[in-house]
Every structure is written in structure tokens, then in C-alpha cells.
Image (tube, helix red, strand yellow):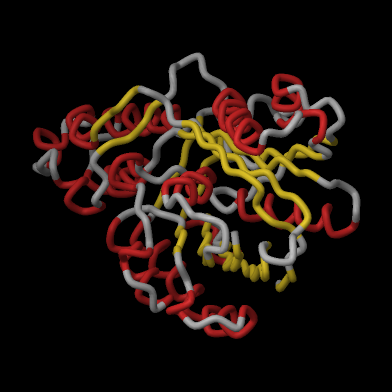
Amino acid sequence: MHMTGHSRIASIGTYLPDQVVTSQELMDEVNSERDFEIANTWFEELTGIYEHRFAAPEDKPSDLAINAGRIALERARMDPKEIGMVLYCGIDRDWIEPATSHRVQRELGCVNATCLDISNACHGFSNGMSVGDAMIATGAAENVLVVTGEVPSHLIHDVVKDIKENPTLENFHSKIGGFTTGDAGGAVILQRASQNSGIKAYRFTSRGRYAELCFYKFDKTGKRCGQMIMDKISAVMIRMHQSLIAETYNDLKWQPSDVDHLICHQVGSKPHHRMAKLAGIALEKAPTIFQRYGNLTSATIPVTLDSAQPVAGDRILILGAGSGLSISQIGLVL
């Protein structure tokens, strides 16, 4: 799927919880050295992820999204009443119903906004931006708040418990991908594009035949379960991006040297290096957050974008991805 953009990013907001948990601490939790003869440094050496942020046990996904949304509104110096739509795009939600975006609307005071949740694993935020863009293009909204809040630390606790209850090497390797994640909130405010700034193009594709590589669900007993086969996921994701990147550059009328910032979905060091290489962009133009925060799932794109500290006029290429598998390539001028 290809879309021409009609909106621009007016502001970015991010939120990271205070609690820091190291990868070595997680490996010690599952007794990696005693039960599997695997050093507690193995995971951080494999992925490059050293630390994660964990929200407080009582924090809801919307709490992180609300904090990020509030910062985005403050940076835009915008009255919350000016927001015409709130799109919540997290994997985690407060409830099965209603849509979590309703709590975000209520707490931020976006009383004139229509509310909607969009879910597509780690790829949800990119999808949320495209839906917000479409609403602006049709005139349905002038200002759209796209937010997410992720608390995968809850799942990490389940992974630790599962590995300890079933301490086989096969189970360890099928579950350990869950240790890549961390908690965060992210937000952007979209407005109609101007002459000098805006999202130029979106390109999306999905491959449902790879859905079983990464899943999070409830089994027949109601217990949460899942797996993340990181090496296979990364390999397929890279191939999917390689198949589209030339067309994306052609749509944008850009060369790799034109890009000021490459913003990638991040699950570890090796996939990140391969993403930069396939895009033809130097690593110094591809900011990283995975070392300190891990894979922030749907919050990765806004947090990485914020960390790049872009300025007006910068050309930004976003390479998104999520289980399913789904990917996107988005080109924009800030």
C-alpha cells in the first residue's frame, strides 16, 4: 500500500519510567548460569541491550501515553480542546473495551476529540500516523494526537516465571526474545502539511504467513503466553525492507545522502546495523535507543525520533516493523 502524505509532525512527546532493570539482572532471575550454563552477560552481548525501563506495577498503558501526550501538547503550545482526534496505538490497553483512547482524551482534556484505538503490534504507531494523516486529508480533523503507552514489563515477568517453571534450553531460547522489551510512552501531534514541511510518502506491506514467529495471546486456561523468534523475525524484516527501499527513494525523489535522520524500529544491534546498510545511510545518522531502553515496541518510533533532536527542514526516513509481519517506510520533512 502506498499513500501520499497530507500532514506534518507539529510536536513530539515521550515518557520513560524511572525504574532501570539491567539485562544481567533478568538473566540472573532465570538462573541462566546454573540451569543453562549461559553467562548472565550473554543476552547483552548478543543484542546490545544493557538496560530496560519498567513502569510501576500499578501503571496502566494509558498512564504512559497520557504523560507523553501532555508533553506533546505543551511543546506545541496547544489547547487540548483543539485536538480533533485521539488515536491510541499500543499493544497494551487498559481494557478490552472501551477504547483506551477515551481515557487519554479524558485525562488530557481533549474534549472535542473523536477517540479510536488502532492495534498492529510494534507497527501500530506507524499505522496510527497514516490514519491520522488520512483524517486530516479529508478534513475530518485539523489536529490529531497519535499516542501509545507500552508496559511489556508485565509480560517479562510472565516470561521469567515460565522459564523458571520449565527450565529447558528449548523453552529458554523460545522465550528469551521477550527480554528485548522495555516500557515507554510516545506521542506526536499531526497537523495539515505546510509548503516547507510534511510527510511526503507512506509505503506499507504485510506478510501474514510469518504471524507465528512472534505472538502474545491467552491459552485455553486463560494464561498469557507467547514467543519471539528474534533471529527469524529480523531476517524476514530485513528482506521485506530491502524489497521496498528503492521504490521508496524513487517516490521521495531522494538519495540516501539526502536523509538527515534514519529512524528505525529497534530490537538490537545487528538488525539496526543491517537496516542502516540497506538504506545506504551512515550509522551516525541512525540514532539508537535500544542499548538503554530495549525494544520499546510501538513507542520505538516516537522515542527514537525525539532522541534524534531533529530541527525544522530535516529530512527523515522512518523504517517501521511489527510482528505479523508488517513493515512501513515513511519519508517526511520536519
Q: Give the residue at the far right of this rendering.
A: 139
Q: Is residue 299 above or below residue 153?
A: below
* Left-right relation of 275 to 133: left
Q: Where is residue 320 in the image (x, y as percent from the top left)?
A: 53, 60
In which quadrant of the rendered view does residue 217 lie?
A: top right
Taking the spot 28% from the left edge, 63% from the top edge, the residue there is 270
Residue 206 appears in the rendering: yes
Q: How many labels does the image show?
A: 0
* Left-right relation of 319 to 130: left
Q: Give the residue at the far top of this rendering.
A: 58
Between residues 114 and 57, which one lies in front from this camera angle?
114
Location of the C terminus by quadrant is: bottom right
Q: In this view, does 100 lie above or below 295?
A: above
In which quadrant of the rendered view does residue 192 lie?
A: bottom right
Q: Where is residue 175 in the image (x, y as percent from the top left)?
A: 35, 43
Taking the spot 76% from the left edge, 27% from the top edge, the residue there is 102
Taking the spot 47% from the left edge, 34% from the top edge, the residue there is 184
Q: Position of residue 160 (x, y in %)?
A: 31, 30
* Left-right relation of 6 to 236: right
* Left-right relation of 151 to 51: right
Location of the N terminus by quadrant is: bottom right
Taking the spot 45% from the left edge, 59% from the top edge, the residue there is 264
Q: In this view, does 102 lie above or below 10?
A: above
Between residues 88 and 113, which one lies in front from this camera angle?
113
Residue 220 appears in the rendering: no
